[in-house]
Image: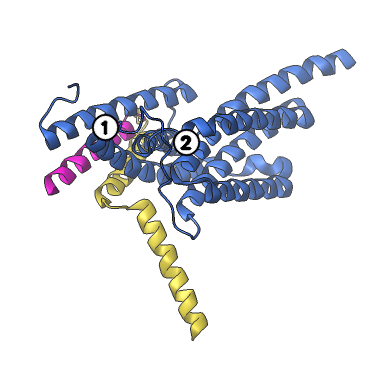
Chain colours: A yellow, B blue
């Protein structure tokens, strides 16, 4: 029983760590990165230039996240 | 025959050394940044674990190393570095906007962000991933150049020499990096992780950057400019004054 509790707590800690690592305190930034990578992959598969997508996504995502955070203050 | 071998060895040595130096600079930049921002103990454990995994992979696979699909690995590590780098970039922008460059004049070292008694898994994972990905790329360079010239020994010497040299420079400058205020350090490491993360993730999807590896430099400049612009905007939003004043 104790062993099960230790394993359960370890798994919860592991999941919490990766949630904090990937999502942090604004899930929209991680979502924007995933969406940007999907668009990059789609453009690339169709033979279109795709390198510009992620720098643009980064700038827009960080700007939006900062704007929302300052409105919450 | 001896002179042919010599003329073959030197170009292999120089090419492996220079190509590996580029990758080693990326590795050491991440490690020094994470160590200075989060503390060194867990970061160095991450470096050690990264090299242990790297050595095991190289020992087991040997010259078959080049069969590892580097694209998906770059995509995975790059995406993780990018999402995490963006969190630090965002926090760094807000902190520098709020506190300015307080502490820079007096060069007082600030305590690292992680001061708990336990293990800092965040520093460990960031350092580990940086070492494994960049280390694998260095190993690929050595194996590819070694295979094309049948001089694995010389290629290995070039790769190890690059790692030792760049690692030595990193160790020498780390105490200087520790003097930088934490808010500014978080912003700087956020910009670096976002830069490398963007570069690797997009490369991992098989997309070529204009200018190849040199794209890292213009991405870095672009994100630095973005950070400075957002700091100015944040200060105007929060305090209603011009940051230049």
Q: Disc number at residue B178?
A: 2
Residue B167 drawn at (x, y percent): 61, 33
A49 or B101, which is in the foreground? B101
Secondary structure of residue under mark 1: loop
**Relative side of A31 to A41, left or right:** left
Within-10-Å neighbours for mark 1: few <14, some 14–19, many 20+: some
Image quadrant assignment for residue A14 = bottom left
Q: Position of residue B81 (x, y in %)?
A: 42, 43
Residue depicted at 26% across the width and 50% down the height: A26
Going from N to C along the chain, the mark reached first, 1 or 2, is: 1
Q: Which mark is residue A20?
A: none
- How far apart are the alpha carbons under marks 1 and 2? 18 Å
Q: Secondary structure at mark 2?
A: loop
What are the residue bounds of the magenta stretch?
A: A51-73
Task: Say above or below: B19 vs B120.
Answer: above
Q: Residue furthest bottom?
A: A1
| Circle on res. B100 | 1
């Amino acid at each position: 029983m104790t062993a099960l509790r230790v394993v359960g707590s370890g798994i919860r800690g592991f999941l919490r760590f990766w949630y904090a690592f990937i999502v942090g305190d604004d899930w929209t930034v991680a979502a924007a990165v995933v969406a940007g990578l999907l668009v990059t992959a789609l453009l690339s598969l169709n033979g279109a230039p795709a390198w510009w997508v992620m720098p643009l996504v980064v700038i827009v995502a960080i700007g939006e996240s900062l704007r929302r955070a300052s409105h919450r203050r | 025959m001896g002179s042919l071998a010599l003329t073959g060895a030197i170009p292999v040595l120089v090419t492996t050394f220079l190509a590996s130096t580029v990758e080693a600079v990326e590795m050491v930049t991440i490690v020094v940044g994470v160590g200075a921002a989060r503390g060194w103990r867990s970061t160095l454990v991450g470096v050690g674990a990264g090299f242990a995994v790297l050595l095991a992979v190289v020992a087991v696979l040997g010259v078959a190393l080049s069969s590892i699909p580097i694209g998906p690995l770059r995509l995975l590590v790059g995406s993780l570095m990018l999402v995490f780098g963006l969190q630090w970039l965002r926090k760094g922008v807000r902190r520098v906007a709020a506190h300015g460059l307080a502490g820079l004049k007096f060069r007082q070292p600030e305590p690292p962000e992680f001061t708990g008694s336990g293990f800092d898994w965040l520093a460990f994972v960031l350092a580990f991933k940086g070492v494994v990905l960049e280390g694998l790329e260095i190993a690929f360079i050595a194996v590819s150049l070694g295979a094309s010239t049948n001089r694995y020994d010389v290629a290995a010497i070039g790769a190890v020499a690059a790692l030792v040299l760049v690692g030595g420079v990193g160790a020498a400058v780390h105490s200087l990096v520790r003097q930088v205020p934490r808010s500014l350090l978080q912003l700087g490491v956020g910009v670096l992780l976002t830069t490398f993360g963007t570069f690797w993730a997009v490369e991992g999807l098989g997309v070529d950057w204009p200018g190849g590896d040199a794209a890292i430099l213009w991405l870095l400049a672009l994100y630095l400019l973005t950070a400075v612009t957002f700091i100015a905007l944040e200060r105007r939003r929060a305090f209603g004054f011009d940051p230049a004043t």
